[in-house]
Image (cartoon, helix red, strand yellow):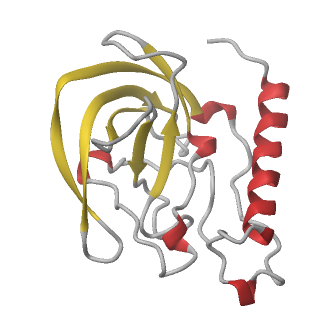
């Protein structure tokens, strides 16, 4: 898929600036109120179009119920509605690219078609939040097996529980643990 890298980069930078403003000023920010004055923005990897990949979609007609552990020791119930198959570039120039399958989830009560894709990779707990990161993928229509969807890891973000213990966040299931580093998206707090 060809795309305008300059327009993509400008849109990504605008989204990051908007998120920093939300974290700094919004009443629902996960940054504790007494820390907002000193908050000077989130930390991100440099935008890298190599981590904007196309995935092949396999939709599960009878989605499996998955209980996902949370950051507070609880669990949340999701439906594994799709598998996304893609090739990720290696951050190590001496290593091969990695073929990866990730599960896309929805809560049973979800009103929209957005896929929730929690991930862990080799940056987790080192350069990124120890509880993993999230992607949300919104297709422009209902997905079918054989469709393709863009997965932009530059949009991977840390959940609110990375910034405050007041939040309960689902942890990436083992099926979404990626055996390579993905130096894209939000870094750790």
Image-quadrant location for residue 47: top right
Query: Residue 168, how many percent across, how many down?
Result: 40, 71
Q: Residue at x 25, y 37 (%)?
A: 80
- Camera sees residue 188: yes
Left or right of residue 125: residue 20: right
- Which residue lies at the image location 32% right of the left edge and 42% below the top edge? 109
Residue visible at 34% across and 9% down in the picture: 146
How many numbered badges does the structure rendering display? 0
Where the C terminus falls, by quadrant? bottom right
Closer to the camera in the image, 101 or 112: 112
Residue drawn at (35%, 61%) of the image: 170
Q: Position of residue 73 (x, y in %)?
A: 26, 76
- As drawn, is 79 to the left or to the right of 178? left
Quarter that holds the N terminus: top right
Q: As displayed, is residue 181 above or below residue 10? A: below
Horizontal and vertical percent position of residue 124:
46, 63
Q: Position of residue 110 (x, y in %)?
A: 37, 39
71 sits to left or right of 11? left
User: Would residue 126 be visible to someone looking at this image?
Assistant: no
């Amino acid at each position: 898929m060809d795309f305008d890298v300059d327009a993509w980069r400008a849109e990504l930078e605008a989204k990051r600036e908007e998120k920093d403003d939300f974290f700094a000023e919004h009443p629902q920010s996960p940054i504790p109120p007494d820390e907002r004055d000193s908050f000077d923005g989130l930390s991100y990897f440099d935008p890298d179009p190599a981590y904007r990949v196309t995935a092949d979609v396999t939709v599960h007609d009878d989605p499996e119920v998955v209980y996902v552990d949370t950051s507070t020791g609880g669990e949340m119930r999701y439906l594994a509605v799709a598998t996304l198959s893609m090739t990720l570039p290696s951050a190590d120039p001496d290593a091969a690219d990695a073929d990866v399958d990730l599960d896309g989830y929805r809560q049973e009560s979800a009103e929209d078609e957005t896929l929730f894709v929690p991930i862990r990779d080799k940056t987790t707990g080192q350069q990124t939040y120890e509880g993993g990161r999230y992607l949300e993928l919104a297709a422009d229509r209902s997905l079918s097996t054989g469709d393709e969807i863009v997965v932009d890891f530059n949009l991977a973000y840390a959940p609110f529980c990375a910034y405050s213990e007041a939040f309960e966040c689902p942890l990436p299931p083992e099926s979404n643990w990626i055996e390579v580093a993905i130096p894209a998206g939000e870094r750790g707090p």
